[in-house]
Image: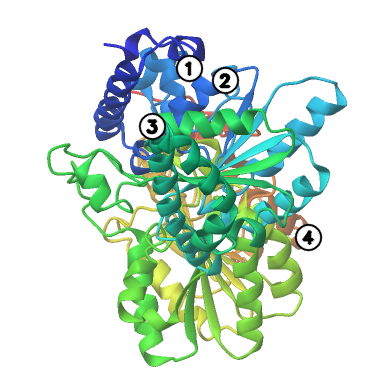
Amino acid sequence: MILSTIHSSADLKKLDREQLNTLCGEIRHELIRTVSVNGGHLASNLGIVELTVALHRVFDTPRDKIIFDVGHQSYVHKMITGRYGQFGSLRTYGGLSGFPKRIESEYDCFETGHASTAISAALGFARARDYQHQDYRVVALVGDGALTGGMCYEALNDAGNQKLQLTVILNDNEMSIAPNVGALSAYLTHLRISAGWQSAKRRVRRLTGVPVIGKASYRIIHGTKKAIKSILMRNSTVGFFETLGFQYFGPIDGHDLRSLEETLAQAKNYKGPCVIHVLTKKGYGYEQAEKRPEAFHGTPPFYIETGDRMKDPEYPSSGHQMADRLSELANADPRVVAITAAMPLGTGLDHFAEKHPDRMIDVGIAEEHAATMAAGMAAGGMRPYVAVYASFFQRCYDQMIHDICMQHLPVVFLLDRSGIGGEDGQTHHGVFDLAALLPVPGMTVLCPSDANELCEMLTWTLQHDQPAAIRYGKEGTPLPQPFSGRNRFEAGKWNTLTEGEDLVILAAGSMVRTSLEVSSGLSAQGIHAKVMNCSSAKPADRDFLRKLKPDTPVFTVEEHMTTGGFGEYITELCRNLNVRIPDVCFGIPDVFLQHGKHDLLLKDAGLTAAQIKDRILCSLGKKANHE
């Protein structure tokens, strides 16, 4: 097996063409095998095998720097840079990350996880290189989906103006997570006709090798080359990238190793900024992923033969249940519109799009634009709902404050995947949103205990003429009976789930379920807790807080950072109300959690039911009983 002998880029450079083709096949086999067991990003990695191999053969890595935009397509890079032996641990607790990690390898020069950042980071490396009079090369590998994000253009504008040596590879597979949207996507699709130019050029290259005919043909073709290329490419190079100050190469076949290496070698020797336009097919080499690239963007474990999931969830995701309720609201109210930033499937809005395609807006990877556009729509009389992962919501912080809340506009943020993100790790944990939302005047912050309550909240927001945010996790499993749906949601009011006089647990969102387990464990030791479902984080239930007894211990529990979170917010509110402040605020400590199964990461954060119960007992001065 050739793959097992590859430990560095130097090993790749020793292989001949036949060995390289064999290696690419082995890489694809290992990608499919590992992701089918561990889950992960499959289609994007299958589509970038040859390009990754070519990059490491042409450039002098790790001295030369390769920066992956988003980084979910770095699996091949990991396999051929000394981590093949660990690849089976991909995305598992304590194993390889699914994204570049500087701690893993010197080949991972920059960590990524959110889109549209690579060109800025690469320009930073290029400037650092030049300031320090070094001479390594810098490459940013960017998908066409990332170019729907405005940060790319800020970086391109800066880089083209500076004339620094920098190579930007545009990996054009016509998709990010979902099919790309917008004028740029249409423009790149337009450029794909120039693949005909590349094919013609390869035929000419073969022709010029023929005696007699070759030289004459070359002179004729060379003289008309620019004119032909201009026609076929419709002035694309002059009209876009070269206008920004970049030399343009391409488009080229991203699955042709020889062409890739030839073009990369040219770019390597170019002294200024350049763009290489590479055409690839997402899911290339695995029929199931080629047919359904969206499904295999980020996939759970699956059967290789069919591509079917190994285990379907018992309940639809919270996002899909949300979208179904939002569709019902849209049926009755023509003002309702749904907005997403390249995440219709992940947020569940594909369900909404089936019923209301004309009121489903996908802006591409542009969260900032989505937020301010929603503000404009709300000011114009619509009722926009912006669905975004909690971790990506961080990207529209300023717009949330400046454009929405200061104007008191009725925009609703639907923050999917809130809490610990699991196998995707640090970049995808949605654990900073409460700290961003709670301090903002006029913002209502809601934390449903399950998808049923989430749907109730949606109905309520349509009558609420102010900004609001609802944070919820992926799982759509309802609370166990008789707790699910016990009380109707009301903003500013908390619901009592269990009665008890010994202590009070104020639980927010996903931690309501855990707090019920804690209550059960305490009850077994003769301690009776009142568990409150604090689904309305802001406004809080001030009437309930005012009635707290001075001698009754109080605990808050949340799946969020303790700093700036629900517990800290309630503590300050209790001080202002001059009532008992919480004894312990349970949440995520001041660390970036790694990747792994959700339950293991909860344990790392001290948020399992057993850990919370034991710490409560310790606070009460009692000994835990583990029998």
Quadrant housing the N terminus: top left
Q: Nearer the viewer, mark 3 or mark 4?
A: 3
| Nearest to N terminus: mark 4 or mark 1 | 1
Are dots 1 and 2 in contact, CB under 8 Å? yes
Who's the residue at 38% across and 32% down the image? 210
Query: Tag 4, which secondary structure?
Result: helix
**Looking at the image, can residue 165 be seen?**
yes
Mark number displayed over residue 576: 4
Dot 4, how many residues are within 10 Å of its Cα: few (below 14), some (14-19), or many (20+)? few
Percent coordinates x, y for residue 624 in the rendering? 44, 26
Are dots 3 and 1 in contact, CB under 8 Å? no
Q: Quadrant of residue 379?
A: bottom right
| Nearest to N terminus: mark 2 or mark 3 | 2
Mark number displayed over residue 413: none
| Nearest to N terminus: mark 3 or mark 1 | 1
Q: Is residue 363 above or below residue 581?
A: below
| Nearest to N terminus: mark 2 or mark 4 | 2
Mark number displayed over residue 81: 1
Query: Tag 3, which secondary structure?
Result: loop
Please give the residue where the numbered disc 2 appears in the rendered image: 107
* Label 4, label 1: how far apart the Cα atoms are: 56 Å
Q: Nearer the viewer, mark 4 or mark 1?
A: 1
- Amino acid on which disc 2 is placed: Tyr
Percent coordinates x, y for residue 372 in the rendering? 66, 72
Percent coordinates x, y for residue 326 in the rendering? 39, 77
- Amino acid on which disc 1 is placed: Thr
Quadrant housing the C terminus: top left
